[in-house]
Amino acid sequence: MPITNNSVAVLTIPDISDYNSERVNYGICSKLTPEFDVTLLGPEQTSDRIADAFSIKRGVKRGYQNKWLRRLLLVPLTFYLLYTHVRRERPGVVASFGNLPVNGLLCAIVSKLTSSISVVRVTSDFTNLWKHQTGTASTVVCFIKNNILGVLAIRLADNVIVLGPVMEEKLQTRGVDPSKLWAIPQPLHIEREDNRADESAMSNVVRTEFDIPDRDQLVLFVGYFKRSKGPKRLAQTLQYVMERSTNTHAVIVGNSGEYEEYVKQNLQRYDRIHFKGWVPHDRLSTYFQSADVLLHPSNSEGLPNVVLEALHYSVPVVATDSGGEVPVYVSNIGADYQELGEMLLNRCYHTDPCPETVRDPQNRRLYQDLFDSIGSKPE
């Protein structure tokens, strides 16, 4: 039976103005319009295009409380915001596309209390994230959030979006009802398609910037220096390659994260490793089109946009199996830094196709199929 009310309430984190949060929320919510009336609940900071495209109900206002009081009040006030909105407006679906342990759980609880239908989204092998934390306190907090609250959110939710068959199978083995699992890949987001108009010219830009000869291999890394991104494996792999090859260069795009200094201290002595720092996302296509291969040594991720972008620009990806969907789309998988390094040294890697299911219109159709097929709960 179709949804009787074509409105969808989407619970977000307070700040969805950064690139990743903005891209996910806009990318998914825009796929539901105009068939569904989407309201975003909770954001205090957002982008102009989100503000223009959707109705927004503000959450806890920044600056009204000090940092600790704000943290204490954020969850109960967010629950109140969601609960009162759902009771008043009676949306057909209550959804959260990120922050599974908090927002996902709140959506699942409120849907049970209000006889609405909940949709939550799993973006990584979340029950193993605690293994990649540093310090006892962070490890314990991460375990409680994901392995207790996150698992509870999935148990209570009516529908669970996963990024592909890997996570779908893992949840089924943990006893999750297969009928409520929906495999929908991460939507591909490309800032500037027009850059592909002259790929031959674009491919020389980065080589010229760092004085990299055309005959030399250019290895690209794009990401933060967080533990989940595999910064130690990144440093080990590039050290392994640099010690054995004189015709390979690496360009590292990104900054911030607890391992930034570690990576720099281990790699700055090589004059063929170039640290670019942060690059605006509308200029990343230049780096992809200049690269011979993307190195993705992550420890724990679902289906990162950087991998999809590389596939979109026909750049081979050399990666680790990070517990998510990357091995479904990438054939060049290494178990450790030596295997990654050998693939780079021997240039033994293949170009994998970019799956059509991450692009529109197929990705849009998958989301619309999910919401079209959701039945309303009996009164």
Image (cartoon, rainbow, N blue to C red):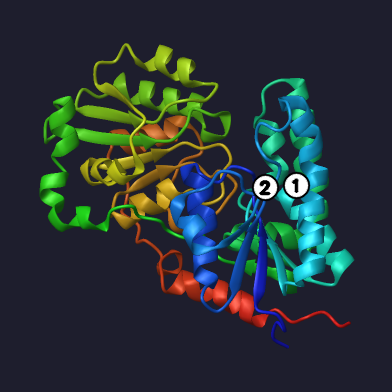
Determine whether, in the image, residue 333 is placed left or right of residue 57. left
Give x and y (percent) for residue 253.
Answer: 35, 32
Q: Mark 1 points at which residue?
A: 102
Q: Is residue 151 visible?
A: no
Closer to us: 144 or 378: 378
Q: Outermost residue, front direction?
A: 64
Residue occupying the point 80% across, 51% down: 79
Determine whether, in the image, residue 167 is placed left or right of residue 339. right
Residue occupying the point 85% across, 72% down: 115
Residue occupying the point 52% across, 34% down: 229
Give x and y (percent) for residue 9.
Answer: 68, 64
Q: Name the residue under label 2.
A: 99
Give x and y (percent) for residue 138.
Answer: 73, 26
Q: In which quarter of the image is residue 71?
A: top right
For the residues marked 2 and 1, what is the alpha-carbon distance in whole angstroms?
A: 6 Å
Residue occupying the point 48% across, 69% down: 363
Amino acid type at mark 1: Val
In which quadrant will I find the N terminus? bottom right
Secondary structure under the numbered disc 2 in the rendered image: loop
Q: Cβ–Cβ below 8 Å for labels 2 and 1?
A: yes
Amino acid type at mark 2: Asn
The image shows residue 13, relative to residue 361, as above or below, that is above
The image shows residue 56, relative to residue 4, as above or below, that is above
Question: How would you rate the neighbour count of disc 2 (Cα within 10 Å): few for under 14, some for 14-19, many for 20 or more?
Answer: some
Q: Outermost residue, bottom direction?
A: 1
Q: Quadrant of residue 246?
A: top left
The image shows residue 220, relative to residue 303, as above or below, that is above
